[in-house]
Image (spheres, grey):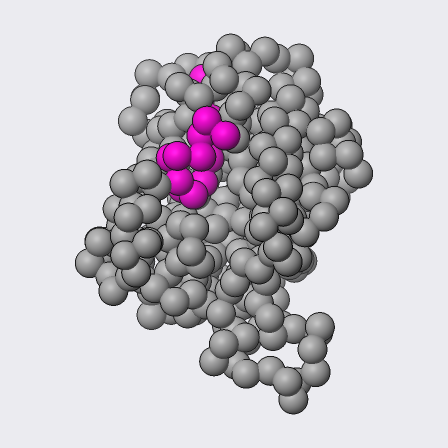
């Protein structure tokens, strides 16, 4: 697939009944970690200042966020017809389906279960799936979407050499019933045609078990075959980000100036000029709080939610929230807000 043009954005028609987050405990200062001089030198450019650590596994964190989202939505448990889980990284038991654990913990006995494995894009992609489900499925008219990122057990000092990660979870209850508030209007993605497997857990189906050393192979790594491949990825990432924005704008016949704010994950403030090389007018509209370490699928909507809570006078606006999935693709949603 061409990384610039790609498929059109998929139209969506759902709104949020609730959007809740679980950032465990108190924030931990990144400059207090035992990190290399190289990573410490990167902190000013990244803008990252603190991270979050959890003693819970990713599914347990997802359950906490899910319970908050259902309670905040004000609906009965029986009104949820589908639970979609989208864990950012490998789950606590590797092959578990967190949606089943969420359903059991909350007693959502009328709900079907679906698990999406799409990295940091998973939460946004799951919103598209929720819209499709609600457009055709009779019965309970709500979907619970959950995600969690447990980076502290998969990375040495919460980084893989480029930026820092954090432990966090998020959950949303969405519906196709009419109403005001925050809505998902479209979902789009742009995928890599090479080096899509550069970011990986080495312990997988590529090598036999006898050759694996869990102490090393269970750490998340970024491993390009050579410097040229890494350079191609950097250029390709800009093209995918640019193409994704163009697709989301086209979905609602918008210009860049129609977008009030853009929300990127906290993967470094220094990347804004590169990622928005074509859509320069959006650079000043990036409202990501880069002080936070990257929280996987949680970031973009967490920053959007924080923005709306700070700007309570907002009556009608359009937003873009987007994120990369490892080195494989960029995904994003066009959102509307109507008070």
The image quadrant that residue 161 belongs to is bottom left
The picture places residue 100, in percent across and down from the top left corner, at 59, 66
Q: In front: 223, or 196?
A: 223
Q: In front: 88, or 205?
A: 205
> Does residue 273 show up magenta in the picture?
yes
Q: In front: 164, or 333?
A: 164
Residue lying at the far front in this picture: please name it: 227
> Does residue 28 show up magenta in the picture?
no
Q: Looking at the image, which residue is at 64% across and 58% down? A: 225
Quick check: 15 above or below 293?
above
Quick check: 269 above or below 233?
above
Q: How many marks?
A: 0
Whether residue 108 is visible to the viewer of this picture, yes or no, is no
Q: In front: 72, or 2?
A: 2
Region of the chain picked out in magenta, as a range: 259-274
Quick check: 49 above or below 211?
above
Residue lying at the far bottom in this picture: please name it: 210
Whether residue 328 is visible to the viewer of this picture, yes or no, is yes
Left or right of 331, for residue 268: left
Q: Looking at the image, which residue is at 65% across and 73% down? A: 204
The image quadrant that residue 168 belongs to is bottom left
The picture places residue 22, in percent across and down from the top left corner, at 36, 53
Left or right of 262, for residue 133: right
Q: Looking at the image, which residue is at 50% across and 17% down? A: 280
Q: Looking at the image, which residue is at 45% across and 67% down? A: 154
Left or right of 2, for residue 248: left
The picture places residue 94, in percent across and down from the top left corner, at 58, 73
Could you tell me which quadrant the C terminus lies in? top left
Could you tell me which quadrant the N terminus lies in? top right
Quick check: 330 above or below 51?
above
The picture places residue 189, in percent across and down from the top left corner, at 67, 37
């Amino acid at each position: 697939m061409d990384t610039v043009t790609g498929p059109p954005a998929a139209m969506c028609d759902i709104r949020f009944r609730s959007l809740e987050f679980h950032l465990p405990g108190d924030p931990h200062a990144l400059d207090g970690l035992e990190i290399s001089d190289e990573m410490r030198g990167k902190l000013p450019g990244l803008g990252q200042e603190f991270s979050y650590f959890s003693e819970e596994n990713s599914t347990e964190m997802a359950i906490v966020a899910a319970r908050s989202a259902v309670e905040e939505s004000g609906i009965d448990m029986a009104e949820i017809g589908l639970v979609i889980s989208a864990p950012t990284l490998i789950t606590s038991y590797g092959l578990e389906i967190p949606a089943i654990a969420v359903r059991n913990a909350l007693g959502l006995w009328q709900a079907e279960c679906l698990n999406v494995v799409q990295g940091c894009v998973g939460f946004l992609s799951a919103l598209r799936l929720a819209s499709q489900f609600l457009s055709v499925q009779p019965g309970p008219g709500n979907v619970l979407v959950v995600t969690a990122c447990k980076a502290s057990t998969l990375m040495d000092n919460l980084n893989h050499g480029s930026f820092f990660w954090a432990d966090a979870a998020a959950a949303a209850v969405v519906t196709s019933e009419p109403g005001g508030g925050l809505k998902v209007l479209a979902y789009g993605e742009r995928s890599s045609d090479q080096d899509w497997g550069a970011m990986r857990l080495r312990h997988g189906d590529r090598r036999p078990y006898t050759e694996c050393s869990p102490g090393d192979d269970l750490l998340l790594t970024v491993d390009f075959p050579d410097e040229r491949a890494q350079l191609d990825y950097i250029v390709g990432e800009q093209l995918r980000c640019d193409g994704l924005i163009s697709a989301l704008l086209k979905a609602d016949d918008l210009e860049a100036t129609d977008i009030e704010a853009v929300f990127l994950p906290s993967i470094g403030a220094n990347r804004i000029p590169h990622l928005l090389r074509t859509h320069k007018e959006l650079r000043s509209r990036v409202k990501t709080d880069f002080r936070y370490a990257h929280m996987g699928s949680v970031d973009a909507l967490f920053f959007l939610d924080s923005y709306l809570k700070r700007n309570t006078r907002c009556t009608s606006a359009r937003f873009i929230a987007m994120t990369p999935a490892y080195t494989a693709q960029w995904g994003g949603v066009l959102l509307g807000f109507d008070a």
